[in-house]
Amino acid sequence: MKVALRALSISLILLWLFVSMLLITVLYSAIRIEIGQVSTETEPTETGARLIIDVPIHNRGFHDITDLELSIDVVVELTGDVIMSSTSYVPIIRKGEEGHLVHVIELNLTEIAENERACRALVLNDTNLIMIARISLTYAYMFRAEIEANSTSPWGAPMSGLTVSLELPGPGEGELVAILSFENHASFSYSFQLEAFNHLGDSLGSSGTTDVYANSTFDGLAISIPVDTALWTGSGYVLAHLFIGSAILTLEVARF
């Protein structure tokens, strides 16, 4: 019995020594993972912009890296809505070799327009965009690691501080006038158009297009909307259509 216990103790000691040496080797090896110079490229798209990130990874350790994954979410701080999600994956970077983690982040305004709450928040409110990055990998085929980090960047609203007052048409008149005040805190230019609807959802008419340049200010801008008097019911709402490239963002800006 004592012999068996002594043999078991020796086996456990040997196993612990093996695990300890493996951990030391893995940790020392993991320190030898080097990140090269990260390159970025931005290119416009029809509905927004695309950011391409290339991260060179030099595995100078003694073990392979597998299942390397980077995921990034972009969140509107004001509402908590996720407006962009992207994931990239590298199956393996062998010991002594170099791999590239290429990650693409695409801002698609058409997709953002489908989220009414996020769209409204971004058009009318200055807020922050929070980028949450998660990177995970398996080292030496047995040790799984995951790191999460986040950063914040300011967002300038294209119609920051918007106020709208309406002058409704009188009897027999066919024109509704919207008076707008706002500032374009965005770094881009765009154009917009107003469209009036009655309470039944019938379109009464649309205004002409107004150009808005980056960092411009409007105070008491009067926009005329011709209305179909046959459809006039005395109550309804006004939509603003923002044209940014080929993307269209639509939101309600007034009721009457």
Image (cartoon, rainbow, N blue to C red):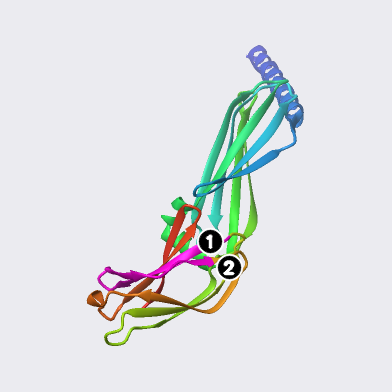
User: Mark 1 or mark 2, which has the lower sequence index?
Assistant: 2
* Most common SS among magenta residues: strand
Q: Amino acid at mark 1?
A: Tyr
Disc tally is 2
Q: Residues within 10 Å of mark 2 (few under 14, many from 20)?
A: many
In the picture, the quarter occupied by the C terminus is: bottom left
- Furthest toward the left, the residue is 230
Q: Where is residue 251 drawn, in percent x and y?
A: 42, 65
Q: Where is residue 96 drawn, in percent x and y?
A: 73, 20
Q: Which mark is residue 190?
A: 1
* In the image, residue 201 lies in the stretch drawn in magenta: yes
Q: Residues within 10 Å of mark 1 (few under 14, many from 20)?
A: some
- Furthest toward the bottom, the residue is 171
In this rendering, is residue 57 above or below 132?
A: above
Q: Amino acid at mark 2?
A: Asn
| Mark 2, residue position | 184
Camera-near label (1 vs 2) is 1
